[in-house]
């Protein structure tokens, strides 16, 4: 009997999961559930404000891949999971129905915490192409002023943070304004509640980032918790400062539909997972990427690379369960970040035993762009 497998999501983890499942199980029936059959290539959003990348580069149509892999696409928004993981509730076009499965992989991503008062005055680039284009258009229309950039975290889920893209955006906007001959008309401010932001990257990386901010005349407001945003300023526990444009990445939590599912959640609202990505207490249910909370080192990153590694483990473990074998495959925690600065980049690498940061290099900028092409080529 062919297994009936459901994958929730259309991001990096979901795409890697269906590719791995199909490679190792040619006859399985696989259904992908997502609002649209579209992958957003989030790592390149930081180039949209500089017009290096456009909407057509960021949004990748998954229909050709789904056809090649013989994966059924089910459009809709997941609203819950029932029957010990065997039934996924989906809403689409005003109707709600249930999709049954023999195995489930959850890769629906997380969501940003929007609790900070006045958060509507800030733009979060990792919300997608619409946000990136809004930043692009705002920058183009400004003749000067203060641009404030920062990020927060989930206090109950320290790993649920997106700091890397904000550092890239910070140095990218600085470089863009210099290329345009407009940098002297703008004040750039970086703010963060930590006195040493980005410490998940490693101490050397933090030193490097703070040194570059000083070098490029980027003001820092560090070590003070944000209180609220207003249309033209940011208020912290240490005071307030003006901001004509606020770019802020909130911390993350789990998917909203998880409140209507039987799975245990972490204190930060993520679906609890084991080191194998298995959801504890449920047969043939796995979670990968931003949806889950895993046993991890204190510097563990939330990034596409980790979602890919988790997805391979989840797919292999699910197929092992179908075969009556132990689901023991785990994944390696490693942080790999090519931190771009618009015309050059640095590589930050971290594992349990090693930390490394490279000097800025133009070739690394082009290597990051080449990686995008290489990664997306088999998907497109």
Image: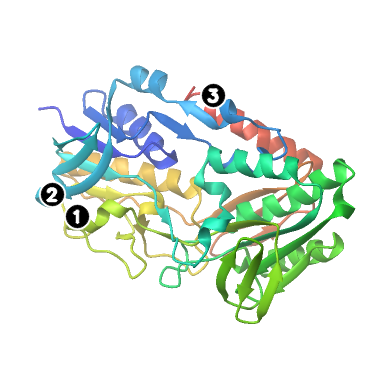
Q: Position of residue 60 (x, y in %)?
A: 49, 27
Label 2 neighbourhood size at 10 Å, few (<14), some (14-19), many (20+)? Answer: some
Question: In the rendered structure, which disc, 2 or 1, sits on the residue that comes first in sequence?
Answer: 2
335 vs 306, left or right, is right
Front-most of residues 166 and 148:
148
Q: Position of residue 349 (x, y in %)?
A: 63, 55
Q: Are marks 2 and 1 in contact (CB under 8 Å)?
A: yes
Judged from the image, the secondary structure of the residue bearing numbered disc 1 is: loop
Res. 38 image quadrant = top left
For image coordinates 31% across by 45% down, the residue present is: 314
The label number, if any, that marks residue 377 in the structure image = 3
The label number, if any, that marks residue 261 in the structure image = 1
Where 137 falls versus 152 (above or below)?
above
**How many marks can you see?**
3
For image coordinates 49% across by 24% down, the residue present is: 378
In the rendered image, is residue 234 in sight?
yes
Mark 3 or 2: the one toward you: 2
Mark 3 or 1: the one toward you: 1
Question: In the rendered structure, which disc, 3 or 2, sits on the residue that comes first in sequence?
Answer: 2
Tell me the distance, in whole angstroms, between the alpha carbons under discs 2 and 1. 6 Å
For image coordinates 75% across by 52% down, the residue present is: 171
Tell me the distance, in whole angstroms, between the alpha carbons under discs 3 and 1. 36 Å
The label number, if any, that marks residue 289 in the structure image = none
Q: Position of residue 203 (x, y in %)?
A: 67, 70
Label 3 neighbourhood size at 10 Å, few (<14), some (14-19), many (20+)? Answer: few
Tell me the distance, in whole angstroms, between the alpha carbons under discs 3 and 2. 37 Å
Q: Position of residue 317 (x, y in %)?
A: 27, 45
């Amino acid at each position: 009997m062919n297994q009936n497998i459901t994958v929730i999501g259309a991001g990096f983890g979901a795409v890697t999961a269906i590719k791995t499942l199909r490679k190792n199980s040619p006859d399985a029936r696989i259904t992908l559930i997502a609002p649209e059959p579209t992958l957003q290539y989030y790592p390149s959003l930081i180039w949209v404000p500089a017009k290096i990348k456009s909407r057509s580069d960021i949004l990748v149509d998954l229909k050709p891949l789904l056809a090649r892999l013989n994966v059924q696409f089910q459009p809709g928004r997941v609203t819950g999971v029932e029957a010990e993981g065997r039934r996924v509730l989906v809403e689409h076009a005003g109707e709600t129905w249930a999709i049954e499965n023999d195995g489930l992989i959850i890769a629906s991503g997380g969501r940003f915490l929007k609790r900070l008062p006045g958060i509507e005055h800030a733009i979060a680039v990792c919300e997608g192409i619409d946000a990136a284009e809004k930043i692009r258009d705002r920058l183009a229309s400004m003749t000067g002023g203060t641009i404030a950039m920062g990020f927060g975290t989930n206090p109950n889920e320290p790993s649920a943070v997106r700091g890397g893209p904000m550092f890239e955006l910070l140095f990218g906007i600085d470089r863009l304004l210099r290329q345009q001959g407009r940098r002297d008309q703008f004040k750039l401010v970086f703010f963060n509640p930590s006195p040493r932001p980005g410490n998940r990257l490693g101490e050397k990386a933090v030193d490097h980032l703070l040194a570059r901010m000083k070098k490029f005349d980027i003001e820092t407001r560090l070590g003070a918790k944000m209180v609220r945003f207003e249309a033209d300023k940011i208020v912290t526990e240490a005071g307030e400062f003006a901001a004509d444009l606020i770019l802020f990445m909130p911390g993350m939590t789990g998917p909203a539909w998880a409140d209507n599912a039987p799975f245990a959640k972490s204190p930060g609202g993520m679906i609890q997972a084991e080191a194998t990505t298995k959801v504890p207490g449920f047969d043939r249910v796995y979670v990968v990427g931003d949806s889950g909370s895993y046993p991890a080192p204190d510097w563990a990153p939330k990034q596409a690379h980790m979602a890919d590694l988790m997805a391979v483990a989840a797919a292999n473990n699910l197929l092992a369960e179908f075969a009556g074998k132990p689901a023991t495959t785990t994944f390696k925690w490693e942080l790999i970040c090519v931190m771009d600065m618009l015309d050059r980049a640095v590589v930050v690498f971290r594992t349990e035993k090693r930390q490394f940061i490279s000097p800025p290099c133009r070739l690394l900028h082009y290597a990051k762009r080449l990686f995008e092409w290489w990664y997306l080529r088999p998907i497109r």
